[in-house]
Amino acid sequence: MTLIEEDSQGEVPRHVAIIMDGNGRWARNRGKPRLFGHHKGVENVRRVVDAAKEADVPYLTLYAFSVENQNRPKDEVTGLMRLLREFLKKEIRNMVKDGVRLRTIGDVAGLPEYAQKIVEEAVEKTKSNDSWNLTLALNYGSRQETLNAIRVYAEKISSGKASPKELNWDTFSSYLYTAELPDPDLIIRTSGEHRLSNFLLLQAAYAEIYVTPDPWPEFTADKFHLALQDYASRERRYGKTGEQIRLKSSISETPVSV
Ligand code: FPP
């Protein structure tokens, strides 16, 4: 994707990516098992998807399972995979009906076979949809994604199909899992931690970051709207000065006299 997309200034973000953190702590604080929190987390996915559609955010990406999450207790990993399967089983028909295109980023081949199967089915059945875009990060890690892109490009070089001289950001980003997606404009992290946790590290170069203390199960549609309001109040400078950015927007707002 292009490095600089200045037209999103002061507007609704084109692409919102969310680190849905805090299900486990939310459940524990209520004396419930962590999986109960993940179950509530899935319910909240439906609410936030609706909120994003209503707000005209065309691309939503959700960090559902990281490569590093594979190291969690086996029961939790299995529970998350089953929740993913149930979610997709229920939602495929709605996504097809509503024109939602589902994409994934991450190493889906590293998921259990039953999860891979339903993910592949959902991606296949929605591939010609273009009304709205939902991406699930599944077995995703930004470092792994980068290494994978380098490996594929290096193989092309060694077989004479590419040259290191041609490598620029546009070429390189076409080898990332996110090749078909615009860079995220806004990254939301719930549950208060101020870190990216191996999520879209390269794509987030100019993303605005919004951290809320609310755990994911309590991140309501209203709170999503607050995050959008906060985004709209920010000045995105992409390395330029504030004066340069304001001058450009005042020129583009000047009415042309006839
Ligand atoms: C991280 O924090 C969150 C996850 C590992 C999973 C997020 C998954 C969901 C919201 C449900 C699955 C999504 C779909 C689309 C089916 P944590 O919840 O483990 O929280 P903690 O930091 O409080 O332990």
Image (spheres, helix red, strand yellow):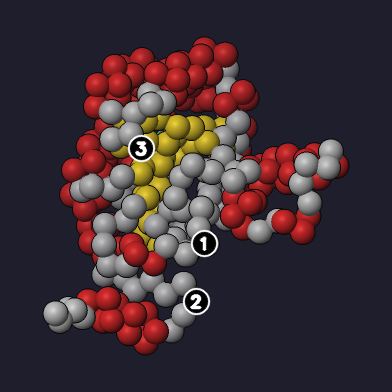
Q: Residues within 10 Å of mark 1 (few under 14, many from 20)?
A: some
Task: Look at the numbered disc 1 and give the secondary structure of its residue.
Answer: loop
Q: Is residue 257 left or right of 1 when viewed as pictured? A: left
**Residue at 30% in and 37% down:** 132
Q: Amino acid at mark 3?
A: Asn
**Residue at 73% in and 39% down:** 152
Q: Is residue 6 left or right of 3 when viewed as pictured? A: left
**Residue at 50% in and 58% down:** 2
Q: Which residue is mark 3?
A: 133
Q: Amino acid at mark 1?
A: Leu
Marks 2 and 1 sit apart, C-alpha to C-alpha, by: 12 Å
Marks 2 and 3 sit apart, C-alpha to C-alpha, by: 29 Å
Q: Given the current orientation, which residue lies at the most extreme left position?
A: 258
The percent coordinates of residue 174 (x first, y second) are 59, 46
The percent coordinates of residue 175 (x first, y second) are 63, 43
Q: Which residue is mark 1?
A: 3
